[in-house]
Image: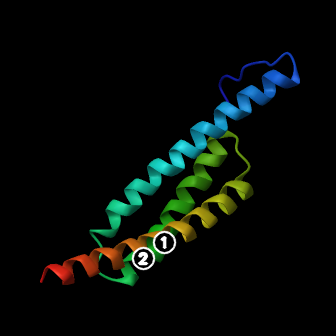
Amino acid sequence: MEWVYQCRNLDEVRTQIDSLDRAIVSMIAHRGLYVQQAAAFKHSDAEVEDGKRVDQVMRRVTRLAGELGADAALTAKIYRTMIAHFIESEREERLRLVGTEEARA
């Protein structure tokens, strides 16, 4: 990390961690909104479960973990869990959209 605030006590450490947790959760929510949008552009479960895209993301975040000094194993584990959840979420959104389209017809 280029810059990390040097905390003077445990309360300051916890304040910094709480701030980071808020940012992390916000970014997960933000990512989820794009996953919902992606569902509208996919026409099959195969497109939702795109293994090539998953591999691409995993390679990118592993590289980023190395560049940013994050634990690569932890980063991979978090991303695999998040991707699995978002695939399921995207599948559900796609089904909702397909149901909506069929109802309009």
* Left or right position of 93 against 81: left
Instruction: Characterize the local packing of mark 2: few (<14), some (14-19) or many (20 or more) Cα atoms within 10 angstroms.
Output: many
Residue 39 position in % (x across, y down)? 34, 69
Q: Residue furthest right?
A: 9
User: Which element is circle 1 on?
Assistant: helix
Question: Split into 4 quadrants, where in the image is the C terminus?
Answer: bottom left
Question: Split into 4 quadrants, where in the image is the N terminus?
Answer: top right
On screen, residue 95 above or below 20: below
Residue at point 28%, 68% (across, down):
40
The quadrant holding residue 81 is bottom right
The CA span between labels 1 and 2 is 6 Å
The structure's colour scheme is rainbow
Q: Residue furthest front?
A: 103
Residue 79 position in % (x across, y down)? 61, 60
Q: Which residue is denoted by mark 2 in the rendering?
A: 91
Nearer to us in this view, 64 or 31: 31
Residue 63 position in % (x across, y down)? 59, 51
Q: Which residue is denoted by mark 1 in the rendering?
A: 87
The quadrant holding residue 16 is top right
* Left or right position of 21 against 15: left
Nearer to us in this view, 32 or 57: 32
Instruction: Characterize the local packing of mark 1: few (<14), some (14-19) or many (20 or more) Cα atoms within 10 angstroms.
Output: some
Residue at point 35%, 79% (across, down):
95
On screen, residue 74 above or below 105: above
Residue type at mark 2 is Arg
* Residue contact at pointers 1 and 2, CB within 8 angstroms: yes
Q: Residue furthest left?
A: 105
Residue type at mark 1 is Ile
User: Which element is circle 2 on?
Assistant: helix
On screen, residue 62 above or below 99: above
